[in-house]
Image (spheres, rainbow, N blue to C red):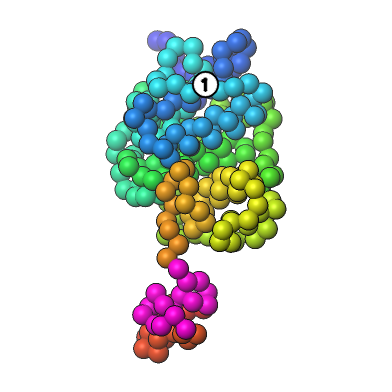
């Protein structure tokens, strides 16, 4: 009886074969009806992969022969690669799944948020890059893996499912990259702000900026010193409502 090679071995062999000639080792797959956040996530993935490979990584609507290893970004592309629809259930607005096993396309990788999710696919894309060796230290400081390290990481089984525990996440690194996105209006050049917004997305911050990349939540107003207004106090209040302080002291800073 002929032996059947494991999927991981097939994927690794296909990847090595792709790198031997002119065929690109990766192709990003994006559904024709992809949303703006999914398009942004696919562009980010293709750009970062291109930086590591030293060659452009194409983005196509489907996985075709000679496309190398197909990376499906977003629900439409992930389902087309054979991801089970149940894998996308329960992801909410920001949950994501990454999977290279149990797909119908050999060697493919699916990276997606839930159907209609504004930010889940963004986090799937950046999380996949982390699994492949990327580290995003600052808007102007990214560690890009070498080509051999990238290909080695991509040849391993990839499986991750995640969802942020906190609804609101905003790390205020003021002055980062010579610009401050938290000032009104933001300071710095347009290029500096774009780098800050991209970095915030990669870090899964969602309280910084409203961008076309993911329709981030709009700041509700109030922070450590003024958020009592969200609990019904007047804008000048500098102490929490007494009844809530007595019954839910763990709510307060």
The residue depicted at 43 percent of the width and 58 percent of the height is 218
- On screen, 16 above or below 247? above
Q: Is 20 left, or right, of 204 in this rendering?
A: right
- Which quadrant of the structure image shows residue 54? top right
Residue furthest to the front: 185
Query: Front-most of 242 and 175?
Result: 175
Secondary structure beneath label 1: loop
Q: Report x, y in % for residue 164.
A: 45, 54
Q: Main secondary structure of the magenta part?
A: loop
Across and down, in percent, residue 24 comes to: 56, 17
Q: Name the residue located 40 percent from the left edge and 89 percent from the top edge.
A: 242
Q: Is residue 8 visible?
A: yes
Q: Quadrant of the N terminus?
A: top left
For residue 186, above or below residue 83: below
Question: Is residue 95 in view from this perspective?
Answer: no
233 drawn magenta: yes
Pinpoint residue 85: horizontal percent, then vertical percent. Answer: 29, 35
Name the residue located 36 percent from the left edge and 45 percent from the top edge: 117
- Up/down of 75 relative to 9, above or below: below
**Few, some or many C-alpha atoms within 10 Å of disc 1 (few <14, some 14-19, many ≥20)?**
some
Residue visible at 65% across and 52% down in the picture: 188
Q: Which residue is mark 1?
A: 58
Is 127 included in the stretch rendered in magenta?
A: no
Relative image position of residue 107 (x, y in whole percent): 47, 23
- Left or right: 53 in relation to 216: right
Quarter of image, res 64: top left
Q: Which range is magenta? A: 221-236
User: Is residue 39 shown left or right of residue 232?
Assistant: right
Residue 104's quadrant in the figure?
top left
Quick check: 88 left or right of 51? Answer: left
């Amino acid at each position: 009886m002929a032996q059947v090679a494991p999927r991981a071995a097939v994927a690794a062999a296909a990847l090595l074969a792709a790198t031997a000639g002119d065929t690109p080792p990766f192709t990003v797959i994006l559904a024709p009806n992809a949303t703006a956040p999914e398009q942004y996530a696919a562009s980010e993935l293709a750009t970062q992969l291109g930086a590591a490979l030293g060659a452009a990584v194409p983005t196509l609507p489907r996985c075709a022969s000679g496309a190398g290893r197909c990376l499906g970004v977003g629900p439409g592309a992930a389902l087309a690669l054979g991801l089970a629809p149940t894998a996308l259930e329960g992801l909410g607005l920001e949950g994501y799944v990454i999977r290279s096993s149990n797909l119908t396309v050999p060697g493919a990788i699916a990276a997606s948020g839930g159907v209609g999710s504004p930010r889940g696919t963004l986090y799937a894309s950046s999380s996949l890059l982390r699994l492949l060796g990327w580290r995003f230290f600052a808007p102007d400081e990214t560690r890009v893996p070498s080509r051999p390290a990238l290909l080695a990481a991509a040849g391993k089984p990839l499986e991750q499912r995640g969802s942020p525990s906190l609804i609101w996440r905003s790390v205020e690194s003021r002055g980062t990259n010579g610009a401050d996105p938290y000032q009104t209006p933001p300071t710095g050049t347009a290029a500096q702000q774009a780098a800050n917004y991209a970095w915030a997305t990669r870090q899964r911050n969602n309280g910084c900026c409203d961008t076309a990349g993911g329709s981030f939540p709009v700041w509700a107003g109030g922070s450590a010193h003024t958020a009592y207004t969200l609990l019904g106090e007047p804008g000048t209040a500098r102490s929490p409502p007494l009844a809530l302080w007595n019954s839910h002291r763990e709510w307060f800073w």
